[in-house]
Amino acid sequence: MSSTNQADLLPALHRLQEKFGYIPDHAIADLAKAHNMAQAEVVGVIGFYHDFRRTPPGRQRLRICRAESCQAMGADALAMHACTQLGVEFGATTADGEVTLEAAYCLGNCACSPAVMLDDDLHGRVSVERLDAILAEGRGV
């Protein structure tokens, strides 16, 4: 991406993500044309950055930290439990459209590992039982 039009792609993607919650397929051709790029290049940029989505997110976003500190404190078991409980893999949304499960590569809460974030709420020292309670509270159960 060398031209000034191409340099504006990331801010444009962020605006779309903020507006829709994801980057809609119908916007990719327009972005490519506006930024003098091939559609495949735009898709490549979207795929490179973890925060951009190509599908609508769930009503809630659960992010589990996968960085070293959290892994050392049990995040792998927490991640496996979340996948089982929600019935999805990372990057997917539950069948009822309630929760999107995402990996985070540091939530900045290393002193309280393992950490998860449900929407904008950061939680530290999360056990499997606490994760279940966080999810139940988020779903209003």
Image (tube, helix red, strand yellow):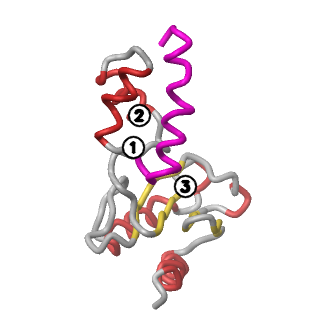
Q: Secondary structure at mark 1?
A: loop
Q: Amino acid at mark 1?
A: Ile
Residue 88 image point, x, y percent:
29, 64
From the image, tell me which residue sits under label 2.
46
Mark seen at residue 6:
none
Please give left or right for residue 98 compared with residue 1 in the image.
Answer: left
Q: Amino acid at mark 3?
A: Cys
Q: Nearer the viewer, residue 66 or 56?
A: 56
Q: Which residues are magenta?
A: 1-22
- At x 35%, y 29%, the residue is 30
Residue extending farthest to the top is 2
Q: Is residue 89 above or below residue 130?
A: above
Number of the label disc, if any, that sits on residue 23: 1
Secondary structure of the residue carrying tag 3 is strand
Mark-to-mark CA distance, 2 and 3:
21 Å
Q: Nearer the viewer, residue 102 or 43?
A: 43
Judging by the rendered image, the residue that carries numbered circle 3 is: 65
From this view, report whether residue 39 is shown above or below residue 12: above
First along the sequence among labels 2 and 3: 2
Q: Residue 64, percent across and down?
A: 51, 59
Q: Amino acid at mark 2?
A: Ile
Q: Locate residue 101, reporting x and y percent.
A: 41, 61
In the displayed structure, does residue 31 sit left or right of residue 15?
A: left
